[in-house]
Amino acid sequence: MAATHPRKPKQTKPKQNTTMKKNSIIRNAGKAIALAAAALFIAQPLSAADKEGAVNMADANAIKKAAIQGKAEVKIAELGAAKAEHAEVKALATKLVAHHTAMNTEIAALAAAKGVDLTAANDPDAEKTVMSLEKESGKDFDKAFLNAVQETHEECIDAFEEQSKDAKDGEWKAWVDKSLPMVRAHHEAAEALEEKL
C-alpha cells in the first residue's frame, strides 16, 4: 500500500490582495471625484457675495435701508407730481422723482457689485404715507406732501450722516457723501415751500 501523505490543504490566495485592490480603486476614484469637484468650483465665476468687493453686514444693511428709502421717496414724489395743486410743489415733486430714480439706479448697481440683495426691499411706513396722501387734495395735499417729503428726507439725512462716519466700504461711503448734499437740498426746498403756502 502506498503511503499516503496527508494532503496539504489547498492554499488560497489571501483575500487581502483583492480587498486591497478594491480599496485602492475606491480611494483613487474618490480622489478623482474630489479633484473634479475642485476644478468645477475653481472654474465657476464668483458670485457677487464671493467677490472681493463684498461689504460687511452693517454696510449691507445700510445699502438695503437706502434702497428702501429711495423707493419710498419715488412713490411719494410721483404722487406729488400727479396731485400737487401749486406749480412749485409740482415742480419739486417732479425733480424728486428724477433725482431719486437716478439715485435708486446707482444704489442698485452698487448693491449688485457688493453682493447685496435688494429683492425684499419695501417700506410699510411709506405705503401708509402714500395711502394717507391719496386721501388729500388741493392745498391740503400740497401741505401734507411737503410735510411727508421733509420727514422722509430727515430720516435719510440722519442715516446718511451716520453712514458717512461709520461705513467701512469706500465706494459706499463715497456714494453717501456724494448724495447727502442733494438730499439736504431736497429737504430745504420742501421746508421753504411749506413756509410759502
Image (tube, grey):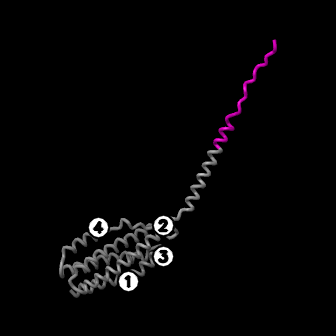
Question: Mark 1 is on which residue type?
Answer: Pro
The disc, 1 or 4, on the residue closer to the chain's N-terminal end is 4
- The amino acid beneath tag 4 is Pro
Residue 17 percent location from the top left of the image? 69, 38
**Residue hosting label 3:** 170
Residue drawn 62% across and 51% down? 31
Q: Amino acid at mark 3?
A: Gly
Quickly name the residue at label 1.
Answer: 181
Q: Is residue 19 left or right of residue 168?
A: right
Which numbered circle lies on residue 124?
4
Rounded to the nearest whole Å, what is the CA distance between mark 2 and mark 4? 28 Å
Which of disc 1 and disc 3 is earlier in sequence? 3
Circle 2 packing at 10 Å, graded few (<14), some (14-19), many (20+), is: some
Residues drawn in magenta: 1-23
Sequence-wise, the earlier of marks 2 and 4 is 2
Q: Residues within 10 Å of mark 1 (few under 14, many from 20)?
A: few
Label 2 close to label 4 by CB (< 8 Å): no
> Crowding near pointer 3: few (<14 within 10 Å), some, many (20+)?
few
Q: Identify the amino acid type marked 2.
A: Ala
Q: Residue furthest front?
A: 1
Quadrant where the C terminus is found in the figure = bottom left
Dot placed on the residue nearer the N-terminal end, 1 or 2: 2
Compute the Cα span from label 3 to label 1: 18 Å
Where residue 142 appears, x then y in whole percent? 22, 81
- Which mark sits nearer the N-terminus, 2 or 3? 2
